[in-house]
Image (cartoon, coloured by chain):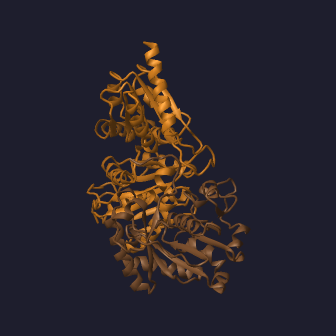
């Protein structure tokens, strides 16, 4: 079905997951991601899949662990407070080297927070979110089409590297409707010889486990896992650049913030300011080399976010503090307006001129 | 030239599949009634207690400026946003001088809230119960599926449909062909359900490219999160 349809971001995630062979969904409803679960509830029974509304987020993530251990493509979705509840299970999945997709359609926090869009789970997502040494691969879509495409990519990356992947969206991305062309990507081709599929009395049994009471063994597991993380960082970085080549001021933002930023960049260009936009698509691994390369010519950076300033720390690290980085953000469910971003671009440009 | 919809009944109800365009059509219907009855009292009722995003209730100030009353939970989008209807909603059935456009929540779950008002609406009998269809929505891609959703809605609220609205669109990618092919789709749903197509809805700037005599409700606004522009 390569035809174009009109979908909500949340629906696009669900349909894309089904299109690439996911037949197991475990979740618990929470605004603003409930349409993922509602869509799965309608579709899964018709295609021989499993939709299960668990008794809690904690139960749901543990069901994901079980299905992933059995080698099938499986996912869960939630919004910020629900992802916190899943944190323990996500850490266990990382420790067990299990591939799965976890979707976070963020809402304002902390605590129960609100139901409007937010990007304030950036630290939680990019630093792992649970306990222990681990990373998730974190992908940030900026359109409904990307919600679909990055869902498929998440499953592929999770299988390829045996790591849990997170799709980090926000309430606006989940709720907005846009035209989408859905591909049919099949079911993934990764061999999973480690999966618990029954020995058939023909091989030694597999063990899926994150527990080791032998410190040198646990250290070895962690070191081996970080070798895979290094491969991911070397091979899987994704980003988009817009008018960066001659830009004096580069706006950095992901997801919905990047859409606002792009409009502001266009307005800045119309006003004669050389502005550009850099959009990380993988938030982990962060495109730090590409951003650092831009620091050679750009004079200042502006981090646009729906949080009190989280992405900005990775921007500062990436440019190694060689250029000033200012923050343009709203929080609590508010979204920076193109005018606010334009003002931040102008301020960053003016400060540089004054400084030189 | 296209022809405007009739909207003869005192109460016009828009129900349909989730995301089919009910709120957009409801808003345009209220605007049309406003222009057609300059001295009449017009109200838009938001019965969507299912989804708290992008609701008609969020347009209250803009509507009041245009002389369109809003019937919606006073607590919508507030800290006590509970799935309950306000007492004000009894004006839908209790105020015979009021022309009302009712925006119902999506699918059969959304239509449950309408059931509360069904006995009085059916007793009065001055009602258009319109089923909104978008052939480009992924779960209603066949006339059979679209008809199935409408049957579920009727069963949930206890009101039979009297007309269909072709609101087929692909967002910013919509062209006249999308609307025209959507009408053919809606005609097939009409055959399956024995409910006639009442009219189509299309962005105002597309209306000039639609066939002469086609019955079309021009749409000039959509309900969205403020200030966000698409790519």
Q: Quadrant of residue A285?
A: top left
- Residue B122, compared with residue A285, is above or below; it is below
**Image quarter hosting the N terminus of chain A:** bottom left
Q: Is residue B86 visible?
A: yes
Q: Which chain is orange?
A: A
Is residue A72 visible in this depiction of the protein? no
Q: x, y percentage for residue A350?
A: 46, 20
Front-most of residues A89 and B2: B2
Where B134 falls versus A146 (above or below)? below
For the point 45% across and 52% down, the residue is: A102
What residue do we see at 48% from left, 35% from top? A304
| A249 shown above or below B218 | above
Q: Is residue B193 left or right of residue A88?
A: left
Judged from this view, the residue extending furthest toward the top is: A356
Measuring from the top left, give residue A180's x and y in whole percent.
Answer: 35, 58
* Residue A44 shown left or right of residue B128 in the figure: left
- Residue that extends furthest to the right in the rendered view of this protein: B87
Q: Colour of chain B?
A: brown
Q: Quadrant of the C terminus of chain A?
A: top left
* Quarter assignment of residue B103: bottom right
Instruction: State the residue in front, A182 or B182.
Output: B182
Q: Quadrant of residue A284?
A: top left
Left or right of B192 on screen, residue B117: right
Residue at the image position 63 percent from the left and 55 percent from the top: B65
Residue closest to the eye, B96 or A329 = B96
Task: Name the one closer to the observer, A265 or A67.
Answer: A265
- The x and y percentages for residue B73 are 68, 62
């Amino acid at each position: 079905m390569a035809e174009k349809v009109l979908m909500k971001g949340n629906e696009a995630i669900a349909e894309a997951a089904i299109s690439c062979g996911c037949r197991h969904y475990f979740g618990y409803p929470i605004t603003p991601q409930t349409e993922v679960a509602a869509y799965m509830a309608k579709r899964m029974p018709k295609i021989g899949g499993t939709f299960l509304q668990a008794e809690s987020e904690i139960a749901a993530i543990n069901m994901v662990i079980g299905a992933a251990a059995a080698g099938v493509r499986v996912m869960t979705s939630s919004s910020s407070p629900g992802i916190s509840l899943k944190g323990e299970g996500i850490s266990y999945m990382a420790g067990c080297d299990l591939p799965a997709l976890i979707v976070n359609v963020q809402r304002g926090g902390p605590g129960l927070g609100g139901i409007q869009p937010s990007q304030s789970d950036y630290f939680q997502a990019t630093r792992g979110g649970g306990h222990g040494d681990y990373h998730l691969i974190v992908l940030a879509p900026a359109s409904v089409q990307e919600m679909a495409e990055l869902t498929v990519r998440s499953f592929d990356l999770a299988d390829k590297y045996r790591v849990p992947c997170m799709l980090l969206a926000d309430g606006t991305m989940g709720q907005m409707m846009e035209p989408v062309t859905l591909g049919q990507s099949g079911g993934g081709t990764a061999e999973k010889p480690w999966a618990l599929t029954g020995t058939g009395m023909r091989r030694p049994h597999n063990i899926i486990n994150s527990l080791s009471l032998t410190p040198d063994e646990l250290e070895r597991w962690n070191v081996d896992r970080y070798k895979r993380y290094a491969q991911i960082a070397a091979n899987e970085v994704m980003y988009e650049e817009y008018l960066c080549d001659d830009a004096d001021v580069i706006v950095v933002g992901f997801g919905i913030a990047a859409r606002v930023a792009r409009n502001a960049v266009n307005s800045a260009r119309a006003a004669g300011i050389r502005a550009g936009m850099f959009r990380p698509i993988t938030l982990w691994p962060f495109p730090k080399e590409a951003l650092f390369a831009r620091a050679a010519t750009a004079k200042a950076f502006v981090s646009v976010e729906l949080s009190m300033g989280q992405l900005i720390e990775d921007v500062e690290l990436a440019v190694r503090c060689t250029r000033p980085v200012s923050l343009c953000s709203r929080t609590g469910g508010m979204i920076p307006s193109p005018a606010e971003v334009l003002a931040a671009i102008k301020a960053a440009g003016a400060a540089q001129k004054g400084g030189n | 030239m296209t022809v405007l919809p009739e909207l003869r009944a005192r109460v016009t109800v828009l129900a349909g599949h989730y995301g089919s365009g009910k709120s957009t059509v409801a808003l345009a219907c209220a605007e049309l009634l406003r222009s057609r009855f300059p001295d009449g009292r017009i109200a838009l009722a938001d019965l969507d207690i299912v989804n708290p995003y992008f609701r008609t209730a969020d347009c209250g100030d803009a509507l009041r400026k245009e002389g369109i009353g809003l019937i919606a939970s006073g607590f919508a989008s507030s800290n006590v946003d509970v799935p309950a209807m306000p007492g004000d909603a009894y004006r839908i059935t209790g105020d015979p001088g009021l022309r009302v456009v009712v925006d119902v929540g999506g699918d059969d779950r959304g239509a449950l809230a309408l059931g509360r008002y069904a006995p009085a609406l059916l007793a009065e009998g001055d009602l258009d119960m319109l089923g909104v269809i978008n052939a480009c929505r992924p779960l209603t891609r066949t006339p059979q599926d679209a008809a199935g959703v409408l049957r579920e809605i009727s069963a949930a609220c206890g009101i039979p449909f009297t007309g269909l609205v072709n609101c087929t669109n692909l967002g910013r990618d919509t062209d006249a062909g999308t609307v025209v092919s959507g009408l053919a789709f809606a005609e097939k749903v009409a055959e399956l359900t024995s409910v006639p197509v009442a009219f189509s809805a299309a962005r105002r700037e597309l209306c000039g490219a639609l066939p002469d005599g086609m019955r079309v409700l021009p749409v000039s606004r959509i309900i969205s999160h403020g200030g966000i522009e698409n790519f």
